[in-house]
Amino acid sequence: MKAIGAKLKELRLRAKMSEKEIAEKLGVDIRTYRKYEKGESKLPIRRLIGICLIYRISADYILGLKNDAN
Protein backbone atom coordinates (compact mmCIF):
# COMPACT_ATOMS: atom_id res chain seq x y z
CA MET A 1 0.00 0.00 0.00
CA LYS A 2 1.33 3.42 -0.99
CA ALA A 3 1.80 6.12 1.59
CA ILE A 4 -0.44 9.18 1.47
CA GLY A 5 2.42 11.37 0.24
CA ALA A 6 3.16 9.02 -2.65
CA LYS A 7 -0.50 9.07 -3.64
CA LEU A 8 -0.57 12.86 -3.54
CA LYS A 9 2.44 13.02 -5.83
CA GLU A 10 0.98 10.40 -8.18
CA LEU A 11 -2.30 12.33 -8.46
CA ARG A 12 -0.48 15.62 -9.06
CA LEU A 13 1.73 14.16 -11.77
CA ARG A 14 -1.22 12.44 -13.42
CA ALA A 15 -3.00 15.81 -13.51
CA LYS A 16 0.17 17.43 -14.94
CA MET A 17 0.21 20.04 -12.20
CA SER A 18 3.12 21.55 -10.33
CA GLU A 19 3.54 21.55 -6.57
CA LYS A 20 3.04 25.32 -6.71
CA GLU A 21 -0.28 25.00 -8.54
CA ILE A 22 -1.67 22.51 -6.03
CA ALA A 23 -0.39 24.54 -3.09
CA GLU A 24 -2.12 27.64 -4.45
CA LYS A 25 -5.39 25.78 -4.99
CA LEU A 26 -5.21 24.47 -1.42
CA GLY A 27 -4.27 27.89 -0.04
CA VAL A 28 -1.02 26.69 1.53
CA ASP A 29 2.63 27.57 1.12
CA ILE A 30 4.52 25.38 -1.36
CA ARG A 31 6.84 24.24 1.45
CA THR A 32 3.83 23.00 3.40
CA TYR A 33 2.52 21.09 0.40
CA ARG A 34 5.94 19.54 -0.23
CA LYS A 35 5.93 18.25 3.35
CA TYR A 36 2.59 16.52 2.68
CA GLU A 37 4.03 14.78 -0.40
CA LYS A 38 7.23 13.79 1.41
CA GLY A 39 5.30 12.48 4.41
CA GLU A 40 7.02 14.96 6.70
CA SER A 41 3.74 16.53 7.80
CA LYS A 42 0.31 15.04 8.41
CA LEU A 43 -2.40 16.03 5.96
CA PRO A 44 -5.15 17.94 7.81
CA ILE A 45 -8.72 16.86 7.02
CA ARG A 46 -9.56 20.22 5.41
CA ARG A 47 -6.61 19.78 3.01
CA LEU A 48 -7.66 16.21 2.28
CA ILE A 49 -11.11 17.49 1.35
CA GLY A 50 -9.53 20.17 -0.83
CA ILE A 51 -7.41 17.61 -2.65
CA CYS A 52 -10.44 15.39 -3.22
CA LEU A 53 -12.31 18.34 -4.74
CA ILE A 54 -9.37 19.31 -6.97
CA TYR A 55 -8.94 15.80 -8.37
CA ARG A 56 -12.61 14.82 -8.10
CA ILE A 57 -11.83 11.64 -6.23
CA SER A 58 -12.91 9.96 -3.03
CA ALA A 59 -10.81 10.29 0.12
CA ASP A 60 -10.97 6.48 0.29
CA TYR A 61 -8.17 6.23 -2.28
CA ILE A 62 -5.83 8.64 -0.49
CA LEU A 63 -6.52 6.98 2.86
CA GLY A 64 -5.82 3.52 1.47
CA LEU A 65 -9.37 2.19 1.69
CA LYS A 66 -9.57 1.77 -2.10
CA ASN A 67 -6.89 0.73 -4.57
CA ASP A 68 -8.31 2.77 -7.43
CA ALA A 69 -8.59 6.56 -7.61
CA ASN A 70 -11.58 6.37 -9.95
Image (cartoon, rainbow, N blue to C red):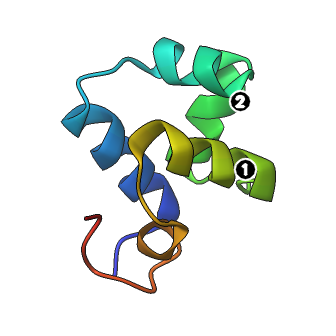
What residue do we see at 49% from left, 54% from top?
5
Q: In the rendered image, which quarter is residue 53 located in?
A: top right
Residue 32: image tag: 2
At x 33%, y 21%, the residue is 17
**Which residue occupies the foreground of this view, 6 or 53?**
53
Q: Would you place residue 62 above or below residue 7 in this image? A: below
Residue at left 71%, top 45%? Answer: 47
Task: Tell whether 46 sits left or right of 66.
Answer: right
Residue 10 coordinates in the image, percent (x, y): 29, 47
Residue 23: % across, % down: 60, 22
Q: Residue at x 60, y 21 (%)?
A: 25
Query: Within 10 angstroms of label 2, few (less than 14), some, or many (20 or more) residues?
Result: few
35 lies left or right of 18: right
What amino acid type should be assigned to the residue bearing mark 1? Answer: Ser
- Sequence order check: which comes first, mark 2 or mark 1? 2
Q: Position of residue 41 (x, y in %)?
A: 72, 50
Callout 2: helix, strand or loop?
Answer: helix
Residue 52 spot, x, y in % from top left: 52, 51
**Is residue 11 visible from the viewing direction of this image?**
yes
Quarter-wise, where is residue 39 in the image?
bottom right
User: Farthest residue in the bottom direction?
Assistant: 65
| Cβ atoms under marks 2 and 1 closer than 8 Å | yes
Q: Quadrant of the N terminus?
A: bottom left
Disc 1 on helix, strand or loop?
loop
Residue of label 1: 41
Vertical placement of 22 versus 38: above or below? above
Q: Specify the amino acid type for callout 2.
A: Thr
